[in-house]
Image (spheres, rainbow, N blue to C red):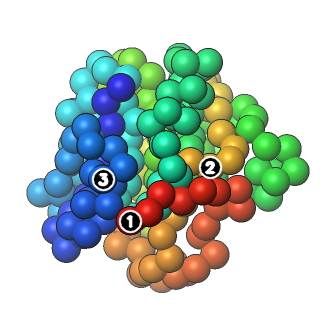
Amino acid sequence: MRYILCTCAGREHYVDYIKKQIPSVEICLDDRGGAMGNFVKSLEMAGDDAVVNIEDDILITKNFEAKAMAVIEKKPSAVIQFFSMRKADKTIGSRWDLGGSYLMAQCTYLPPKISRGLLAYSKKYDRIDHKSHPLDSMVADYLRVTKQKYWIHCPSLVDHRVGVSMIDSRRAKTNRQSFTFEDPADG
């Protein structure tokens, strides 16, 4: 499995932590001026391969790769979200959801050819300059247009770090954490 980490200058300590947990992770360093451009760059890197696309502002569960692969092996053709912070995570647990509801791209498995499809979609996406969550919106729109559901895995295998968002500093510094994340890896 390929793992691609989207990051930017100034977050080297986050990269070091993730590389410790996932030694084979490929680094997608932002040289395009923002999260959306760097996400598109990560899609170019992925090509037609299956990948786990990761943002740098996460904490990872222990034995992440083994846990992720156990889920992927059961649903290799599905988009799988490994981070969620919805109330249903506690009451329902793992579940299918409509593609148009996709949100929070901290860690998502993209099956073969999905990155290429997202890349093509990004070239005609008319909300690419969405200020708050452009890549979340684009993925949701792509999944909706292509009539795909996605799998939300619980417990979350990653958690969102507490801190100021690089995408939108108005976002809450806290209250963006998973209700189900457990067993964090030492950093």
Q: Which of marks 3 and 1 is nearer the N terminus?
A: 3
Kindly indicate whether the residue at mark 1 contacts the one at mark 3 (C-beta within 8 angstroms). yes
Q: Residues within 10 Å of mark 1 (few under 14, many from 20)?
A: few
Q: Residue 73 location, x and y as percent?
A: 55, 18
The residue shown at (71%, 61%) is: 179
The residue shown at (19%, 73%) is: 10
Q: What residue type is labelled 2?
A: Ser
Number of marks drawn: 3
Q: Residue 168 location, x and y as percent?
A: 41, 74
The residue tagged 3 is 20
The residue tagged 1 is 187
Pick whichever, 125 or 91, lies toward us: 91
- Name the residue furthest left: 31
The residue shown at (74%, 38%) is: 94
Task: Determine the secondary structure under disc 3.
Answer: helix
Q: Which amino acid does label 1 sit on?
A: Gly
Kindly indicate whether the residue at mark 2 contacts the one at mark 3 (C-beta within 8 angstroms). no
Q: Which amino acid does label 3 sit on?
A: Lys
Q: Distance between the residues labelled 3 and 1?
A: 8 Å
The residue tagged 2 is 156
Q: Distance between the residues labelled 3 and 2?
A: 19 Å
Q: Distance between the residues labelled 2 and 1?
A: 18 Å
Q: Which of marks 2 and 1 is nearer the N terminus?
A: 2
